[in-house]
Structures are given as structure tokens and as C-alpha cells.
Image (spheres, helix red, strand yellow):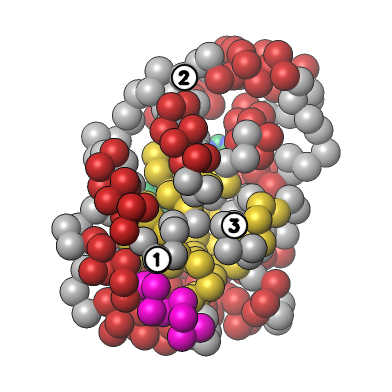
């Protein structure tokens, strides 16, 4: 595993396992498989309704809590203190490694203050944003006492956020890619250019995409319900893309929004 150092010195795995759209009843089994494969970063959210399954899996895995990095996300800007307590209870843990505001909700600075308090009280180790762009992102950065460690945004081969990534770099916020394969939309995993590069390294398109992020300083959290794909997506630490191949992959960018959300 490769780790990245967040702006507060904490080490975060650069490749994780996302559990969006996995029903709570199946989450324990999926996360247990992912932990067996070797994932140590689990990305959930209050909105997904499966924090309990994540907590069950971590408990059942027998892996020391400190070896696992848990991210969750706030679903509301009301009763933030209570929502954090609920996540701690569902995840069955004393602390959350990374807490994000899931999307712009309005009055986000007030939410951020609660999150800063949670860091100070030891309930959360790092805080960040998700789906914050432009002035919404700037507003938090300008007024934060603790700067955002992460901004988790839509990021795939057709939307590589080249310009925004530079902005995030300047403020020391790490870009984290949600939907790193664009959920397979727009034929991303069948793209002939990616296939050609993948064949050269005896790797799959999914592996080449994840390797591009790793070499670009982007944290990624692919989701799969299949053990074979969990393993495939994790098997990216034994090869390196050339600078030329990285440029070719970066040139596939169209800054194209595939979900119509943000
Ligand atoms: P992904 O881009 O990770 O795509 C997941 C889809 O790709 C699934 O249908 C999966 O199928 C398939 N897949 C996974 N691996 C492979 C592979 N190697 N080859 C072929 N197909 C594959 O999309 P997600 O939306 O799930 O995003 C990942 C994570 O990002 C989420 O789980 C969540 O944690 C986070 N997220 C955050 C958001 C936010 O607003 N902050 C929004 C959306 C996601 P199968 O399961 O059948 O294997």
C-alpha cells in the first residue's frame, strides 16, 4: 500500500474501498472481503445507510482498529454533534479517521466549526469536504481554523479536474476521486486508448486508471461487490506508468460531468 500524508501529518492509504450503493445487509460481507484483499481505507457515509455494516466488518476482521482508516460523511448541517455521535455508534469506534461534509448544504462554515471541535476532542482525526468547488470551497478555506485535508469529488478519466487539482494543491488539500471509473459510464473501461496502454503493462484498464491516480497524488476509492474485482483493483503496486503514458491518459480528459450532480 502507498500512503499519502495529509496536511495535519496523518497518513492516509491512497487506495480504498467505497461502499456507496451496497445495502447495509451486504456491507459486512463486502467490507470483510475487501479487508482480506488488503484494503485498509473504507469510504462510507451517513447517507449510504451502511455504517453499521462497515463497523460490523471491522470488528469481525480482527484487524487492529488503528490499521484501518475510516472515512464517513455528514448528511446534514443540523445537529452535527449528534450526527457524529451516531456515526461513532454505528461504526462501533471511538474515532473517525476522516469526516467530510458530503455536499454543499448551506451554512457550511457553522458545520465546519463543529467538525473542528470534533478534531479537538479527539473524535475525528482529520476533516475535509466533498463536492465543494469554486466559492464554496474558497469560503471554507478562507475561514477555516483547520484547513480541509481532503476534497472528495467526481474524478474519472473524462473529468480529471486538471485546473481545480492545482488549486487544491496550493491549499494543501488532497484530491480524492469518487467514481474513479465513472461507474463504468461512457465506455470508460472499454476506451481503446486505455486498453492499448493496459495491454502494454499486462494490466486491465481499471488498473491503469487507478495507477494514473496513484502516480498523480490522487486518492481513489473504487467500489466493487465482486471479490475478483476488489483484488484486480488492488493489484496496482507492481508496475509504473511512463511519463508519456500518463500524458496520453491525461489528454483523454474532457472535464465531462457524468452524473449531473455537481
Ligand atoms: P466506481 O467508479 O467505483 O464504479 C463502480 C462500478 O464499477 C460498479 O458497478 C462495479 O461493479 C464496477 N467495477 C468496479 N471495479 C471494476 C473492474 N475492475 N472492472 C469492471 N467494472 C468494475 O463508482 P462509485 O460510484 O461506486 O464510486 C466509488 C466510491 O466513491 C463509492 O463507493 C463511494 O464510496 C464514493 N462516492 C462518493 C460520492 C460523493 O458524493 N462523495 C459520490 C459517489 C461515490 P461491481 O460492483 O458489480 O463489481
User: Few, some or many C-alpha atoms within 10 Å of disc 3 (few <14, some 14-19, many ≥20)?
Assistant: some
Residue at mark 2:
253
Of marks 2 and 1, which one's residue comes earlier in the chain? 1
**Inter-mark Cα distance, 3 to 1:** 16 Å
Asked if residue 29 lies left or right of residue 64, the reply is left
Tell me the quadrant of the picture where the C terminus can be found: top left
Give the mark nearer the N terminus: 3 vs 1: 3
Between 228 and 40, the one lying in front of the other is 40
Mark with earlier residue (3, 2): 3
| Residue 118 sits inside the magenta stretch | yes
Work out how far the residue at label 2 is from the one at label 1, CA to CA, in angstroms: 34 Å
Query: Residue at label 3?
Result: 6
At x 57%, y 57%, the residue is 7
Q: Is residue 175 left or right of residue 113?
A: right
Q: Give the residues drawn in magenta, as a range.
A: 115-122
- Above or below residue 94? Residue 174 is above
Secondary structure mostly seen in magenta is helix
The x, y position of residue 195, in whole percent, is 63, 18
Disc assigned to residue 145: 1
Mark 3, secondary structure of its residue? loop
At a point 19% along the width and 74% down the height, the residue shown is 78
Name which quarter of the figure residue 197 lies in: top right
What x and y, as percent, mark residue 146?
A: 44, 65
Camera-side residue of 255 and 5: 5
Amino acid at each position: 500500500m502507498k500512503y499519502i500524508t495529509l496536511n495535519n501529518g496523518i497518513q492516509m492509504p491512497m487506495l480504498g474501498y467505497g461502499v456507496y450503493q451496497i445495502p447495509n445487509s451486504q456491507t459486512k460481507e463486502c467490507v470483510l472481503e475487501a479487508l482480506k484483499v488488503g484494503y485498509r481505507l473504507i469510504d462510507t457515509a451517513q447517507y449510504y445507510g451502511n455504517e453499521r455494516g462497515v463497523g460490523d466488518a471491522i470488528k469481525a476482521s480482527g484487524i487492529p482498529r488503528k490499521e484501518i482508516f475510516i472515512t464517513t460523511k455528514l448528511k446534514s448541517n443540523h445537529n452535527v454533534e449528534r450526527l457524529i455521535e451516531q456515526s461513532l455508534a454505528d461504526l462501533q469506534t471511538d474515532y473517525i479517521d476522516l469526516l467530510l461534509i458530503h455536499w454543499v448544504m448551506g451554512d457550511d462554515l457553522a458545520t465546519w466549526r463543529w467538525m473542528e471541535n470534533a478534531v479537538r476532542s479527539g473524535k475525528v482525526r482529520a476533516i475535509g469536504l466533498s463536492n465543494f468547488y469554486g466559492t464554496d470551497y474558497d469560503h471554507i478555506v478562507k475561514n477555516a481554523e483547520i484547513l480541509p485535508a481532503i476534497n472528495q469529488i467526481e474524478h474519472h478519466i473524462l473529468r480529471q479536474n486538471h485546473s481545480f487539482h492545482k488549486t487544491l494543491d496550493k491549499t494543501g488539500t488532497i484530491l480524492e476521486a469518487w467514481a474513479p471509473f465513472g461507474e463504468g459510464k461512457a465506455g470508460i473501461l472499454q476506451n481503446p486508448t486505455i486498453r492499448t496502454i493496459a495491454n502494454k503493462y499486462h494490466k486491465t484498464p481499471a488498473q491503469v486508471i487507478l495507477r494514473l491516480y496513484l502516480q498523480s497524488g490522487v486518492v481513489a476509492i473504487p467500489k466493487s461487490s465482486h471479490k475478483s474485482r476488489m483484488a484486480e483493483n488492488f493489484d496496482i503496486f507492481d508496475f509504473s506508468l511512463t511519463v508519456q503514458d500518463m500524458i496520453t491518459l491525461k489528454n483523454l480528459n474532457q472535464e465531462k460531468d457524468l452524473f449531473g450532480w455537481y
